[in-house]
Image (cartoon, rainbow, N blue to C red):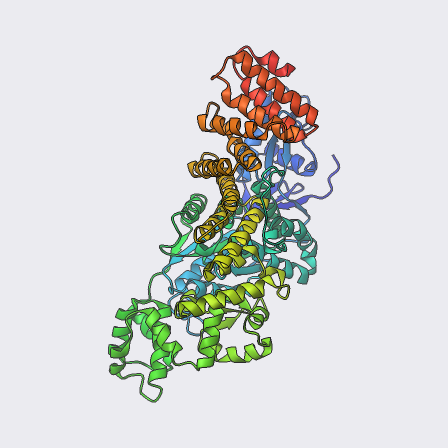
Amino acid sequence: MLNRTSQYRFGAFEVDSKRREIRRGPDVVDVQPKVLDVIVHLIEARDRVVSRDELLDDLWGDAAVSEGVLTTAIHAARTALNDSAARAWAIKTVARRGYRFVAPVAEGDSQRPASVPSPPTSDAWPQEGAGDYVGGEASLKRVTHSFQRAVHGEGGILVVTGEAGQGKTRLLDEVQRLAQNWQALVATTSCEGREGAAAYSPWASLIRKLAVQCEQDESLRDVGASLGEMTSLLSGAFGEPQGPVGQADALEAPAPSRFLVVDSLGLYLSRLTLRRPALLMLDDLQGADQASLRLLSQLAPEIRHLPLLLIVTVRDHSGSQESLLPETLAEVARHNPGGRMTLDGLSKQETGVLVAKLLGAEPSSEWVDTIAQRSEGNPFFIREIVSLLQMDHSESSPAQPSWATQIPPAVRDVVLRRLNRMSPSCRELLQHASVLGRQWSLDLLGLFLDEAPAALAERLVEAAEMGFVREKLDEPDRYQFAHGLLCETLYESLPMPERQALHRRAADVLESQAVRVAERLPGILAHHYLRVGDEAACARASDWAEEAARHAVSLGAYDEAVKFYGVALDALDRMDHPDPSRRCDVLIGLGGARLDARIADPAGRDSLIRAAQIAQELDESDALVRVALALASTSLQTGPRDREVIKILTAAMEALGDRGSMAVRARLMAQLAYQRQGSMDREAASKLHEAAVEMARASNDDQALCEALNLRCAALSGPGLGERRVRD
């Protein structure tokens, strides 16, 4: 075989066929010569499947060996590469054909990943953080060690937990500062900020930021060019909404598999980190959409094999009962044992250090004792208290213990007291901005307030100087509140009538053509209209939420679709006179999405049965057909002889009569034949199946024919029916 080169790199490994060795980072992997031959052969023939016969002939020649020898060698090769038949990240078994090397491979050593400095020793590590960062030195040291392991092939996910205000976001800021010297690709994004954001939006944000870095680095531009596929798959963050929907079409082609998203993103990250190690950060994971959480769970085993460290932060005691967050964290922990770090409050000594830095002078021990006790070491609370007392006592000495008696009991009270010290104009600006969420662009805020972006930037200077907002360095002209508690407190301070009026204004602006597509997403529009609350606004909220749900289904983000269909149903429930046809449509979508997310979900079945009742009351045969097909779509997994499904299928066929398309009638007939097997004599069931198959053939509809044949084969699964299955 013609060797193109002698060096190959993939994941954390490097194979040198001339030197006859495999390295993982700086370490040589102990492997037998014949196992190395198998690996090299598969790498050099990675553009095709290599048969077992080819491996035996080329590597063992005329030696009399059994196929068991090759099986043992493949197992040893996978072990050496930290692979397995189940994971198959490097060597994949192709049933009845052979093996294929599937990991992305770079040839030669010209694109070796950049190195990072070794973790500093405890003596060399700074005892104080940058600026007013206090108490996080041990956390930074752990991140550095984790990234060093990732560069050497032990990638992973580090979960950082803690209560609100404990410094999780600040830790990521410090990590970004340190990572400037690591010669790595670094990207961070927040999962919180806007209600109704599209599925996969945090991941789409990370990919955009990585793409910018690839474009700026000539050696990475070819990798960045592969972003086209990813941006189309994650188009929820880029696609333009088509407007509120009318009647949903449940008979359209099925959505692409969500596993395609996982495979594509995994491949992209593999290609990228093959060139350069990466450090990615997802802040406030509790605010992520369900699809992004599921994607994180599915990527967890892949990341272990890449020069990649992913840091996620999550607030303690967060996540609703329906959230996938606990399940996601459990799955991440399963693939990253020991990959969890909890941020606790500052000690009294660290509180004193932080207060002294903030004040620029040494406070009294009594004051430090009181603030440490009152704040329980929460850094955000400490900063807010000090800022408030500095404003109240700008002419007093910071050492006076009398200050301690004026500390409010709760952090929200501190924030409100500080807000009252701002100019009325700036306070009103921040209150209005809080309606848009934790982060927003100057352009959007300008349209919202009917004010020029440049003028707004000047007005925001006061808020920035007081530490309430900050400009996002990686997204020019985009601002965010310094902490989620600030945004929440400002929003809650608005009187309800003013809040509703601002949400109406936001919806009007976002629905116009003046804003960027990325700002005008269906889920965000539904969020604003729902909070307006009147009859017309709730109707609009339901329409936009259903559009958001259908878009999520098109991405295979079924959990997110369930959430948005729930919003659409909630909006209808708030109306005095909702359209029953709309309720039927939403229930059909909700039930289908629930069954797509979890096949045996009883809530999905219940939603569809409620929709069937409404369809029959309204005498809407098309809606009843959609319910019947959605309810029967999981029949192969749940089994036949379901009385409720049989009843609805029968009613749908009777309601449709001869008016419906031949393909739809064939699908209904095939599902009914499958459900009724065992409840009628075999010959009658067989005739019904045959009639469904013949009708499907006559319709020239491939989907109907495949469905009818599949159900026919399932019905002929008993003993002695093999020849009949082959014949049919």
- The answer to whether 41 appears left or right of 604 in the picture is right
Relative height, residue 696 to residue 294 (above, below): above
Between residue 690 and residue 521, name the one nearer to us: 690
Q: Can residue 301 be seen in this snapshot?
A: no
Give percent across and percent down for residue 540. Answer: 53, 56
Give percent across and percent down for residue 690. Answer: 61, 18
Check the image and name the residue furthest to the top.
720
Between residue 193 and residue 592, name the one nearer to us: 592
> Where on the picture, by quarter, is residue 450?
bottom right
> Where on the picture, by quarter, is residue 525?
bottom right
Relative height, residue 454 to residue 587 (above, below): below
Relative height, residue 203 to residue 635 (above, below): below
Check the image and name the residue furthest to the bottom.
395
- The answer to whether 356 appears left or right of 140 in the picture is left
- The answer to whether 402 appears left or right of 537 in the picture is left
Relative height, residue 585 to residue 236 (above, below): above
Give percent across and percent down for residue 388. Answer: 35, 78
Q: Can residue 230 be seen in this snapshot?
A: yes
The quarter in which the C terminus is drawn is top right
Between residue 191 and residue 152, name the one nearer to us: 191
* Residue at x 65% of width, y 23% of height: 695
Give percent across and percent down for residue 461. Answer: 51, 79
